[in-house]
Image (spheres, grey):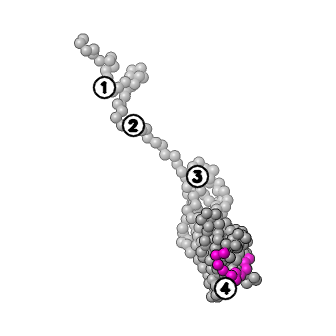
Amino acid sequence: MAEKFVVKAEKKEVGGKNVNRRLRTEGKVPVVVYGGGTESVAAVAELKELAAVLRSDAGVNTVFSLDIAGDVNDVIFQDRQIDPIRGRLIHADLRRFAKGEKIEMTVPIHLIGEPEALKEEGAVLSQAMREVVLYCEPAMTPEFLELDVSGLEAGHALHVSDLKIGEGIELREDPEDVVASIITVKEVELEPQVVEGAEPVVEGEEGEAKPEGEAEGGGDKEGE
């Protein structure tokens, strides 16, 4: 499991557009934290720390720790506002989780290893599933799942049931769903194309192509 993000924040006592504008010029982002059975909290966090979470593999689905003056909670992005011109985060709503609460999370699948079967002519590794839904406590959510395909053979497949997950984590997918397989791509021989309206030809005695129906001697001359 990847190292968990910890974002430090401080309570935001005063609101208003001017205050928020000043905070953004200082590289900070106003956030609102709610859920978890307690009251909502307005806070301010560093833009670079929140941006690092959004750039992670799971992106907005990343569960991270928010530390507000020593009060640490697991949170996830519930909503966010992006500056349409500068393309940067300017506000975020964060959902806080109660202790022991389980949620469904979507995590990506990374294929690792190099199958020997790929050395065969026309062999291609196909990844049918690139993410799966897990059900677990936020703190136990992996950033991604790895699937070793090094032993995969041509014509065979690896399924959801082949994914390795930790204790206390449930897969919300059909175990028989194919995740990865090796298929063989064969070249298709194209038939000669005939131009519509073209006159068919036959071979002459000396290999010379002549229009079909023309006499070998060139035919009788007119008037002879």
Dot 4 surroundings within 10 Å: few (below 14), some, or many (20 or more)?
few
Q: Nearer the viewer, mark 3 or mark 1?
A: 1
Residue denoted by label 4: 99
Q: Is residue 198 left or right of residue 15?
A: left
Residue denoted by label 1: 213
Q: Is residue 131 above or below residue 14?
A: above
Q: Nearer the viewer, mark 1 or mark 2?
A: 2
Q: Secondary structure at mark 1?
A: loop
Residue 194, numbered label: 2
Give the mark nearest the N terminus, 4 or 1. 4
Q: What is the x, y in percent for residue 52?
A: 70, 68
Q: Which amino acid lies under the numbered mark 2 shown in the image of this protein?
A: Val
Would residue 135 be visible to someone looking at this image? no
Q: Are marks 4 and 3 in contact (CB under 8 Å)?
A: no
- Residue at 41% across / 22% down in the picture? 208
Q: Quadrant of residue 16?
A: bottom right
Q: What is the x, y in percent for residue 146?
A: 66, 66
Cα distance, mark 3 to mark 1?
A: 50 Å
Q: Secondary structure at mark 3?
A: strand
Q: Are marks 3 and 2 in contact (CB under 8 Å)?
A: no
